[in-house]
Amino acid sequence: MNMGNCYVGIDIGKTNMRFAVSGLEPELKYYSKRTYLRDTPDYLFQQIFKGIQEAVEVAGYHKKDIKGIGIGVPAVVNRQSGSIVWGPDWDFLSGVSITKPIADFFNVPVVADVDTVMAAWGEQWAGYGQTCDRFAMLTWGTGVGAAIIINGEVAENPDNLFAEFGHSTVSDDDWPCKCGSVGCVDTMVCGGGIARHGYLAVIQGQQTLLKDLCGNDPLKITSHMVFEAANKGDKVALSILERIAVLLGRLCANVVHTIQPKKIVIVGGLAERSQFVLETINRTMSSRCWLIFKGLTECEVVASKLTDTAGVLGAIYKVQKIVAKKNENRSEESQRVAGRR
């Protein structure tokens, strides 16, 4: 049985929930990933309650040891109330506070934010932020998210907003995006976008292993099939990933022009496959950014070493900061009261 306090981090994605437990250091005592169902708010909370209780118990703590819970969600969150403002897959929670029921159930501080912001706090606490105080982060998976870290602090913009590089336009393609616009890099290079590139290659009659991998049904092509074909040397799949890398490289050049980060860190579900794209991303970024090719700044695009734990680590770190601030405020108030006596 562990002794002392613990913090819980939750990272909710499109199809999976991740739960983690740690103390004050970025060393996870527990980590799990499980599928969940979007049904009703009540059913979602029941799944969250069960996941937290199991995580704490397996990590060797009691419910009373929990000092705070952080949650990352794929939606815009009101940072004060914890209510869901907007999310393409979270309409069923629109206007519902995701923090209040959990805070009431466990009687601890609970904080929620968009998943990209939480992942950035994780990278700052446990990843490249340990040696780099100015970097940008791209989440690459079912979508493309972003965050900015300057002087060791993650930028959390007014009105509950955050950096949104993924909805930049870096090509003339007019693919519709879930945000309501067209041609966003998000829809071109995310998991679904990679699958669509594969689909188009097959229906256009290109000679590719993808035809066999999908059982001659182009609608069944996934991003994983494209990477599998590329790993086997398939020229069509490799050309798709080259195209993806060029688009991401253009995006990264824009990021360097804007904030001059020392690094751009790729995290998310596809980060572990970034060996296929990193060289081209860096080459494209360097050739497209005059600040780099004129020697005025340097930047390198790298893959996170946190695999898919960045989100839960960041959720834990952010709630730790909030708990520490509350304790500091209470201490200052106690000193003021004592001084008036």
Image: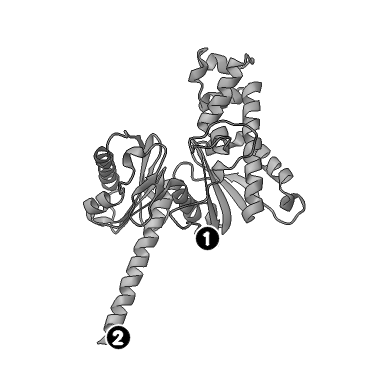
- Dot 2 amino acid type: Gly
Q: Looking at the picture, how far across and down is residue 228, in whole percent?
A: 55, 24
Seen at 57% across and 23% down, the residue is: 198
In the rendered image, the residue lying farthest to the bottom is: 341
Describe the element under mark 1 as helix, strand or loop: loop
Q: Are marks 2 and 1 in contact (CB under 8 Å)?
A: no
In the image shown, does 208 or 27 lie closer to the viewer? 208
In the image shown, does 79 or 174 lie closer to the viewer? 174
Q: Looking at the picture, how far across and down is residue 200, in whole percent?
A: 58, 21
Seen at 43% across and 52% down, the residue is: 314
In the image shown, does 121 or 63 lie closer to the viewer? 121
- Dot 2: few (<14), some (14–19), or many (≥20) neighbours within 10 Å? few
From what the image shows, is residue 135 above or below residue 37? below
Residue 16 showing in the rendered view: yes
Which mark, by number, is residue 339? 2
Describe the element under mark 2 as helix, strand or loop: helix
In the image shown, does 69 or 307 lie closer to the viewer? 69
Q: Looking at the picture, how far across and down is residue 98, in whole percent?
A: 31, 48
